Amino acid sequence: MGKDTKYRIAKNWNIVNIVIISLGTLSGIFMGFLMMIAGATGWGILTIISVIGGAIPLLIMPIILQVTLKKDLKNGCPKVHNAMAICALFFAAPFGLIVGLFILLGDVDTAPISSSSKSSELL
């Protein structure tokens, strides 16, 4: 499996991540409206504000990952994305673990060879 394949797998899982968070947000907003219709207006508004306030931080990291991976797959950029992968591991719930691991595995293919391994290859 090459670097591009691993990045594509990470990108696909990231799309799944965005869809699940978006569906959860929409269902929470819908439940808030149902609460307001049922008469609990204060609780409905609180639910909607809480759902939107919780969804925005959860969607920021997957959207940044999606834009970066799409750009790098298009341009064939040889950069290493260790910081982005670690942020995905911790901040891109619920599938950030899978996305971060595949980004790290893709970066293993692009990592520069250290000088110690170059000297051992020459011997």
Image (spheres, rainbow, N blue to C red):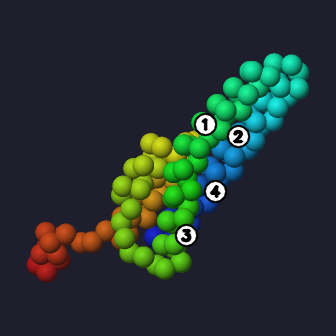
Q: Disc 1 marks which amino acid?
A: Gly
Cβ–Cβ under 8 Å for marks 2 and 4: no
Q: Earlier in the sequence, mark 2 or mark 3?
A: 2
Which element is circle 4 on? helix
Image check: 82 left or right of 96?
A: left
Disc number lying in front (2 or 4) = 2
Residue 30 disc label: none
The residue that disc 2 covers is 25
Q: Amino acid at mark 4?
A: Ile
Instruction: Indicate the amino acid at tag 2.
Output: Thr
Q: Earlier in the sequence, mark 3 or mark 1?
A: 1
Q: Secondary structure at mark 1?
A: helix
Considering only vertical position in the picture, is 57 above or below 14?
above
Question: Hey, what amino acid is under mark 3?
Answer: Lys
Residue annotated with mark 3 = 70
Residue at horizontal 82 percent and vertical 31 percent from the top: 33
- The quarter in which the C terminus is drawn is bottom left
Q: CA distance from mark 4 to mark 3?
A: 11 Å
Image position of 53 with respect to 87: above or below: above
- Whole-percent x and y of residue 95? 57, 46
Q: Earlier in the sequence, mark 2 or mark 4?
A: 4
Residue at 42 percent across and 76 percent down: it is 77
Question: Which residue position holds label 4?
Answer: 15
Is residue 43 visible from the viewing direction of this image?
yes
Task: Please identify, in this view, whether the residue under mark 3 or under mark 1 is nearer the observer.
Answer: 1
Please give left or right for residue 38 compared with residue 118 in the image: right
Q: From the image, tell me which residue sits under label 1.
A: 53
Q: CA distance from mark 2 to mark 3?
A: 24 Å
Q: CA distance from mark 2 to mark 4?
A: 15 Å
Asked whether, in this view, residue 84 is left or right of residue 118, the answer is right
**Circle 1 residues within 10 Å: few <14, some 14–19, many ≥20:** few
